[in-house]
Amino acid sequence: ASVTLGAVECLSMTLKAHPNLERIELSNCSIGNNVDIILAILQSDVRYINLNFNGIGSPGAEVISGYLETNPPIHELDIDYNEFNEDDAVLFSQALRRNTNLLEFYARQSARGTNFSIAGIKSLIKSVFDSTCLNSVAESNHRCKLNLFPLSSDLRDHVEMINETGLFSQIEIKKRKLLIALRERESLLRYLEVPVELMPEVLCLILGEENGKKRINMIYEIMRWWSMPSLYSYHHQSCSRAVAKRKRDEYREREVQVL
């Protein structure tokens, strides 16, 4: 059955007046690219919205991605089996990078078979796990789980592994994703831009690697390629700060003794 703008606006106002109602189920309602209806639905301030099987395409994707960028209180968004393309996937990816509230994002294959391309799927994965460097891994979205099918076996395993990290605290998720990034690379040369102050954290993660031979190889690669001048500079600055702190503490102790 199709829905009208008037009906959706009435529903939206009702939901706002009753905050205990947290779900909108509008599956297979022939919404298409009626952006006014889509916007009215999204502005209902509920926790879960289901818009699957609605023939929504690029115009609707622009509205949805714009909505997600505002970081609304929604926790789950189901837009499975619609008519999105690769450009829409990029829009969703950019929105997810800026969103810290969404916990589940469903965007599985289109009802008409026009699926996201591999590039589009990878752009979505990148929003929650950008392995360009360790900094980008740390800055990825660590709250949202992706539900993207069908996927090739390697991409499916990759997404499942990333989604599993969502069972932990935000700090623990970040650490686990960093370790995943290190494990997935035969060489760590991609991570040379990691700030020196992150090195202890990275080394701790590597020590958690169960394969002893792999653990030693990873430590060797890091110590071989990380910038030694930067390490010396960071060590010198740390020592200088430690010496200055010790002198301040000694001065305060002498002041207390005089008093």
Image (spheres, rainbow, N blue to C red):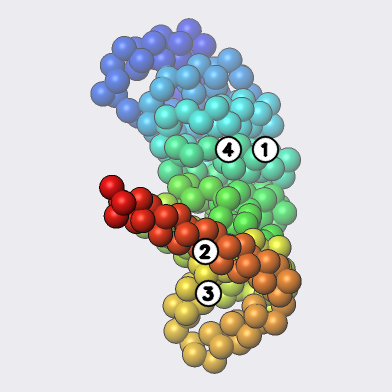
Q: Residue furthest bottom?
A: 213
Q: Nearer the viewer, mark 2 or mark 3?
A: 2
Residue 3 in sight in this render: no
- Determine which of the numbered discs, if any, sits on residue 91 in the image: 1
Q: Nearer the viewer, mark 1 or mark 2?
A: 2
Q: Position of residue 138 (x, y in %)?
A: 56, 55
Q: Amino acid at mark 4?
A: Arg
Q: Which residue is mark 4?
A: 98
Secondary element under disc 4, as helix, strand or loop, is loop
Q: Amino acid at mark 2?
A: Val
Q: Residues within 10 Å of mark 3 (few under 14, many from 20)?
A: some
Q: Earlier in the sequence, mark 4 or mark 2?
A: 4
Q: Amino acid at mark 1?
A: Leu
Disc count in the image? Answer: 4
Q: Nearer the viewer, mark 3 or mark 4?
A: 3
In the figure, is residue 128 to the left or right of 72?
right
The reply to whether the C-beta atoms of the residues labelled 4 and 2 are less than 8 Å apart is no
Secondary element under disc 1, as helix, strand or loop, is helix
Q: Earlier in the sequence, mark 3 or mark 1?
A: 1
Q: Position of residue 49 (x, y in %)?
A: 43, 31
Q: Which residue is mark 3?
A: 203
Q: Residue at x 66, y 70 (%)?
A: 231
Q: Residues within 10 Å of mark 1 (few under 14, many from 20)?
A: many
- Determine which of the numbered discs, if any, sits on residue 243 in the image: 2
Q: Residue at x 65, y 80 (%)?
A: 223
Q: Earlier in the sequence, mark 1 or mark 2?
A: 1
Q: Position of residue 74 (x, y in %)?
A: 43, 32
